[in-house]
Amino acid sequence: MQMSDAILIRSPKLSDVNAIGKLADALGYPTSIEEMQHRLHHLIAHPEHVIYVAQLPEASVAGWIQVGISETLVAGR
C-alpha cells in the first residue's frame, strides 16, 4: 500500500455531518442533518466521549467509531 492509499483516522469536523448522516442512514439509523449536526456538536465538546472518523484518500468519511463513559446502577462508572 502506498502512503497515498492510506486511510486517514482523525477527529470529526462539523463539515463531516452530511457524510456521517448518510452513513448512519445506510446503517438503519435515519437522522435529519440538523439533528446529526446537533449531536455531533454536543459530543465533540463532551469530555467523556471520543469520536474518530475514517477518511479514504480523496473521499469523504467512510466510517466512524465512538467511545464514551457511561454510568449504570449496577456497575457504577
Image: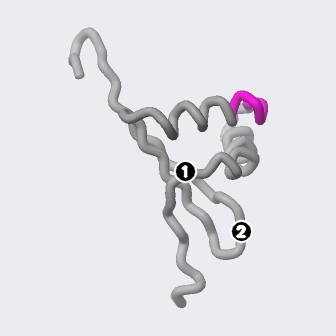
Q: Which residue sits at x=70%, y=62%?
A: 60
> Which residue lies most toward the bottom here?
2
Where disc 2 sits, the SS reads loop
Q: Where does the image place residue 20, in percent across and percent down from the top left?
A: 67, 46
Residue visible at 71% across and 28% down in the picture: 35
Q: Name the amino acid, label 2.
A: Ala
* Residues in magenta, as a range: 31-36
Q: Which residue is labeled 2 in the image?
A: 59
Color scheme of the displayed model? one colour
Inspect the magenta stretch and tell me whether residue 2 lies in it: no
Residue underneath mark 1:
64
What is the quadrant of residue 6 in the picture? bottom right
Residue 70 to residue 50: above or below? above
| Residue for point 59% across, 54% down | 63
Give, as a three-letter code, the residue at label 1.
Trp
Q: Is residue 72 left or right of residue 17?
A: left
Q: Spatial distance from mark 2 to mark 1, Cα to Cα? A: 14 Å
